[in-house]
Image (cartoon, coloured by chain):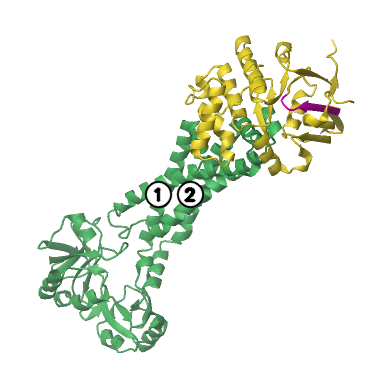
Chain colours: A yellow, B green
């Protein structure tokens, strides 16, 4: 299968011949099959497909949260299968920002503390960390909500805190797993605007899993997955 | 340090559960402090026994008296520095429940033998001058509100006076303090010469001897020599170190160490289950959050460390508070009104308790931390 996007020289993400399967008793369940994909630096890519098509699995492989059964995943020149667990964790901290459907904020921490989490793994001092947290929260329009706990924020605001946490380390790649899936239309629109801005004005490369055609329309390109393979369009 | 806010926030997310666990750990350590003090009390100050002192008593029983004439013979044995005698009086002050030890002694050598009894010089001189004089330990004096100059009547069922009376009256001329923690300040001492002249029976007899050796290393040889000196006599003796004597005395109650260890093991095992359950619940509730931490770059080992530190903090805090409260409570002294004259929480046990607190934290956090460490990020996020 040909790569879904050409020009491999500028590709930030290269997925080559990736398979992912799980062993369930004697049965082997294939989630991804012979998959090739390239994502260019600065591109905003949407991944669409029905439930069980392998979108989140692919996102996890690109984000180094899981390992392929076969094939290779290269991000920013690093082949992930060559990294051990510790190396992978350090690599994620440096290159990847995750945005989750249900925000996944730590309820016991304030917005600022949530955003600060990835920075705890850096050598930055307290003042620098605080400066970065304030910057990230101001980018997402929540500079005034530093001390609020997640329970005190609306869904849209929580997702924006989640995005601030994802960008606070200035990562190479943002991986968003249905970032608007739990939001109403207005809040979802605001999040999409924000992601668009991060891509256009801050040069972030974004891969977004979504079920929502409206959301995918905001991306530069949409890749369709069906039964673990990339297809031109989702069968009706 | 930068992870502190994360750890504290996690501990405080379920305040009631954390609070109850903290209280459980605290209560366990208060109990630990009390049991330590009771162990010290039941072993009657074995830890503070003089290394250079030994006791010599009748080979048959401590209740059998020895002739006063043994004093000079023991003094002549090489390696002996000082010898004093003591006898059991067994008097009752007002009420049989008001127990405290009373013994007739020879004041001057007695005070030299026990430098840990701190008696002001003026009171010492008063005791030497006053035949009916007596000194009491601070604990007993405070217990009954005695002050110097008081007249103390003691009833005895053993020692009838020449006039047939069973009531002995003493003039309190001094109150002594203990030089170190653990020194028993409950006894009451009075003069042997007055006692021996006034009693109707048992004249010229004493209860036992206390011998100070010139060098603690010589104690075994001196003990052997004393035993041999009185071998085949009508009153053979047994000599052993003060520490061994006190240990033997304590063992009459049972193997206190084993009993207390068994109680504490049961207590700490229960607390281990309580704290372990708290940590396990806490980690289970946070599966998704642990997945997020790993997703943003925390390593498995860092997650393990976070859970263990959280667990140790919970146990450590409970231990610190419990040990502190235990220290304060035991500092009030003997809670039994005389049965445990030496009653305190030793600093050594306090340090051991702190170690136990950390150990409890590690043990209760080990399994949840291990599970958190092994958690796969994708699974954790899916489970959330």
Quadrant of the image occupied by residue B83: bottom left
For label 1, the SS is: helix
The percent coordinates of residue B299 (x first, y second) are 64, 41
Describe residue B316's horizontal placement relative to residue A72 as left or right: left
Q: Earlier in the sequence, mark 2 or mark 1?
A: 1
Q: Is residue B351 left or right of residue A72?
A: left
Magenta portion: prevailing SS class:
strand
Q: CA distance from mark 2 to mark 1?
A: 10 Å
Task: Report the front residue among B162 and A8.
Answer: A8
Q: Is residue B336 left or right of residue B126?
A: right
Q: Residue at x 23, y 70 (%)?
A: B103
Q: Which residue is mark 2?
A: B357
Q: Which residues are magenta?
A: A34-42
The correct choice, above or below, for B264 with respect to A113 in the image is below
Contact flag, marks 2 and 1 (Cβ < 8 Å): yes
Marker disc for residue A222 = none
| Displayed quadrant of residue B349 | bottom left
Chain of the residue where label 1 is placed in the rendered structure: B
When the figure is inspected, residue B262 is found, relative to residue A235, above or below; the finding is below
List the residue tagged with mark 1: B323
When the figure is inspected, residue B361 is found, relative to residue B158, above or below; the finding is above
Query: Where residue B288 appears, x then y in whole percent?
Result: 63, 30
């Amino acid at each position: 299968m040909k790569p879904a996007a050409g020009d491999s020289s500028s590709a930030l993400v290269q997925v080559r011949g990736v398979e992912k399967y799980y062993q369930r008793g004697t049965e082997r369940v294939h989630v991804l099959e012979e998959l090739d994909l390239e994502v260019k630096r600065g591109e905003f890519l949407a991944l669409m497909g029905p439930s069980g098509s392998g979108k989140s699995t692919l996102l996890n492989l690109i984000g180094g949260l899981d390992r392929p059964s076969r094939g290779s995943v290269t991000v920013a020149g690093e082949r992930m299968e060559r990294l051990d667990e510790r190396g992978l964790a350090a690599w994620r901290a440096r290159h990847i920002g995750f945005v989750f459907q249900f925000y996944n904020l730590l309820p016991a921490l304030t917005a600022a503390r949530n955003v600060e989490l990835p920075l705890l793994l850096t050598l930055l001092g307290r003042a620098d960390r605080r400066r970065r947290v304030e910057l990230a929260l101001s980018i997402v329009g929540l500079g005034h909500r530093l001390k609020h706990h997640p329970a005190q924020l609306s869904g849209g605001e929580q997702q924006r805190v989640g995005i601030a946490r994802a960008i606070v380390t200035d990562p190479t790649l943002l991986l968003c797993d249905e970032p608007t899936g739990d939001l109403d239309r207005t809040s979802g629109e605001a999040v999409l605007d924000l992601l668009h801005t991060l891509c256009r004005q801050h040069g972030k490369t974004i891969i977004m899993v979504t079920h929502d055609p409206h959301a995918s329309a905001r991306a530069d390109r949409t890749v369709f997955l069906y039964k673990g393979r990339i297809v031109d369009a989702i069968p009706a | 340090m930068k992870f502190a806010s994360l750890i504290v926030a996690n501990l405080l997310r379920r305040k009631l559960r954390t609070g109850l666990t903290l209280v459980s750990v605290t209560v366990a350590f208060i109990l630990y402090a009390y049991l330590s003090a009771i162990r010290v009390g039941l072993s009657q100050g074995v830890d503070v026994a003089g290394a250079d002192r030994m006791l010599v008593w009748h080979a048959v029983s401590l209740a059998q008296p020895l002739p006063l004439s043994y004093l000079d013979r023991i003094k002549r044995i090489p390696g002996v520095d000082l010898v004093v005698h003591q006898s059991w009086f067994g008097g009752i002050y007002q009420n049989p429940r008001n127990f405290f030890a009373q013994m007739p002694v020879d004041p001057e050598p007695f005070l030299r033998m026990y430098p840990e009894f701190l008696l002001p010089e003026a009171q010492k001189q008063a005791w030497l001058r006053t035949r009916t004089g007596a000194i009491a330990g601070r604990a007993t004096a405070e217990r009954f509100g005695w002050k110097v100059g008081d007249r103390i009547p003691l009833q005895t069922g053993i020692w009838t006076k020449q006039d047939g009376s069973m009531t002995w009256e003493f003039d309190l001329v001094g109150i002594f303090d203990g030089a170190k923690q653990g020194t028993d300040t409950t006894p009451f001492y009075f003069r042997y010469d007055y006692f021996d002249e006034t009693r109707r029976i048992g004249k010229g007899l004493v209860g036992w001897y206390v011998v100070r050796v010139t060098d603690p290393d010589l104690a075994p040889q001196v003990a052997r020599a004393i035993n041999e000196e009185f071998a085949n006599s009508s009153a053979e003796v047994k000599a052993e170190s003060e520490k061994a004597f006190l240990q033997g005395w304590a063992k009459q109650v049972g193997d206190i160490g084993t009993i207390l260890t068994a109680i504490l093991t049961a207590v700490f095992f229960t607390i281990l289950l309580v704290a372990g359950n708290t940590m396990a619940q806490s980690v289970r509730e946070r599966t998704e959050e642990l997945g997020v931490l790993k997703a943003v770059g925390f390593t498995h080992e860092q997650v393990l460390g976070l859970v263990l530190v959280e667990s140790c903090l919970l146990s450590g805090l409970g231990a610190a508070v419990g040990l502190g409260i235990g220290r304060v409570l035991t500092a009030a002294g003997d809670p039994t009104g005389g049965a445990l004259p030496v009653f305190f929480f030793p600093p050594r046990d306090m340090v051991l308790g702190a170690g136990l607190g950390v150990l409890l934290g590690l043990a209760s956090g080990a399994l949840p931390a291990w599970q958190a460490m092994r958690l796969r990020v994708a699974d954790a996020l899916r489970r959330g």
